[in-house]
Amino acid sequence: MMYLLGIDIGTSACKAAAFTRDGTEAASAVEPYSVAYPAEGYAEQDAREWYAAVCRAVRAVAEKVGAGNIAGVGVDGQSWSCILCGADGEPLAPTPIWFDRRAAAQCERIKQAVGEDILFSVCGNPAQPSYTTPKELWFRENAPDLYKRTYKILQSNSFIVMKLTGEYTSDVSQGYGCFFFDMAKKRFDADIAREIGCDLSLYPDLRDSFEVVGRVTHAAARETGLVAGTPVVAGGLDAACGTLGVGVYRDGQTQEQSGTSGGMSICTEKCAPHKKLILGVHVTGGSYLLQGGTTGGGGSMKWFAEQFGASFAGDDGDRSVFSKIDDEAATAAPGSDGVVFLPYMAGERSPIWDARAKAVWFGLSYSVGRAQMARALMEGVAYSLRHNLDTAREAGASPDVLYPAGGGANSRVWTQIKADVTGLPFAVPNPGSAATLGAAMLAGVGVGVWNSFGDAVRDTVRISRTQNPDPSARDAYDRGYGKYLALYESVKNLY
């Protein structure tokens, strides 16, 4: 039996999974690690802990399926890292991760020196302190000795690829974290890098995410249990691999994020940036992903269940609290009898980009019960999705079908609400880890298991159910969405 190995470097844990050619997950393992918050605005991880977790997880999977049966390895990972690597391949410092904002001052200086409009015209994204570029300048100014010793700056997936193969690479899907990445040309712009003050020689050449960039070394084989010589592809951004893992690779197809956070990724053939969204190159290489990322999602429901789940207890103890909340939310009418929820539990990202934003329940009264509050929470997350989709349409994107990824897709009630609010059908893939499957698909295309991503999706992704919008709910949700937009405008100055 032949397997493809996908490795996911998430924020809280590494997952490794082996898949058969038909997309069946044959074995998997998860190894957690920590996030450190040494100061206000800081969030950092030790890349050595990532690799140690990879070694443990991969060894567990390889022992189950047989290391000699693994035909290729793909790695996906979190975005906007800034891993300073020495010539020996070891990280010189903890890496600030995707929500670290220590480099706010550096980001402002870049915008003033180069101009926000010029930066946006090149990289297709608004300049944010959490991106890789201002973090590089932060290290240069605050840790000059470490910066001088830096051989290469890597991302999460390229660091793991380097540890497995000894090869230093960058991939195009992670390029969007650099202000000097030319989005239209899919390459670094040396003139902009120089003007910003970045050392372009520290960044490896860009490679396609599915390109075989090296093979497992003897040292890595001893550490991971893999067979030396196993091909490894460049890999890519976790969100992009997750998008591929639910079958999104053609123009107009859209992944809906139903995990802890929410959002969407629209596959588009056009390089069509929008200042309120995020644009990147898809791991398939030939198209782009126009993305919206929100803090409201499954995390909001997890918080609700933790705080109020005991009130849903009953005799049917075998059913999860989430299932009970689903059933009760289904008894409330669309629009939740006028109750509206702003799901800004940790500030909000796109399209409002307001770090001060707070969650709000509006419209409570003595006639409101748990059912309306639970449904309003679900509807609020759905409104945030619609807000991002409407913003993407301003950039010329044309979302048609939504393919959800994450635990929230298991809720038929919530998925139907999202379909009704957005007016778009949902095609729900079989449950599983979309990111690791997407990484494994990159490996499969890279080593020739499939000739195209269309072939890979055809063989691996199966739709378990389709949920279409209910036209009778449209008016109620149009009114609710109008309230949702107006409510934020009314309260934002109070934050």
Image (cartoon, rainbow, N blue to C red):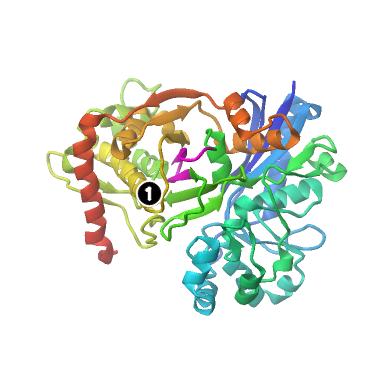
Residue 411 shown left or right of residue 281 in the figure = left
Q: Is residue 365 visible?
A: yes
> Looking at the image, is 212 positioned above or below residue 150?
above
Q: Which image quarter holds the C terminus?
A: bottom left
> Looking at the image, is 381 positioned above or below residue 85?
above
* Residue 6, quarter of the rendered image: top right
Q: Position of residue 60 (x, y in %)?
A: 72, 32
Front-lying residue, 176 or 134: 176
> Looking at the image, is 388 positioned above or below residue 229?
below
Start-end of magenta stretch: 250-266
Amino acid type at image mark 1? Arg
Magenta stretch: residue 6 in it? Answer: no
Magenta stretch: residue 261 in it? Answer: yes
Q: Position of residue 151 (x, y in %)?
A: 77, 65
Q: Residue at x 19, y 38 (%)?
A: 476
Q: Position of residue 278 (x, y in %)?
A: 48, 55
Q: Is residue 332 visible?
A: no
Question: Mark 1 Cα within 10 Å, few/some/many (few <14, many 20+)?
Answer: few
Which residue was labeled with disc 1?
393
Front-lying residue, 308 or 181: 181
| Residue farthest along the left direction in this orientation | 366
Residue 156 shown left or right of residue 420 in the figure = right
Q: Position of residue 271 (x, y in %)?
A: 51, 53
Front-lying residue, 243 or 349: 243
* Residue 382, quarter of the rendered image: top left
Front-lying residue, 213 or 367: 213
* Residue 323, quarter of the rendered image: top left
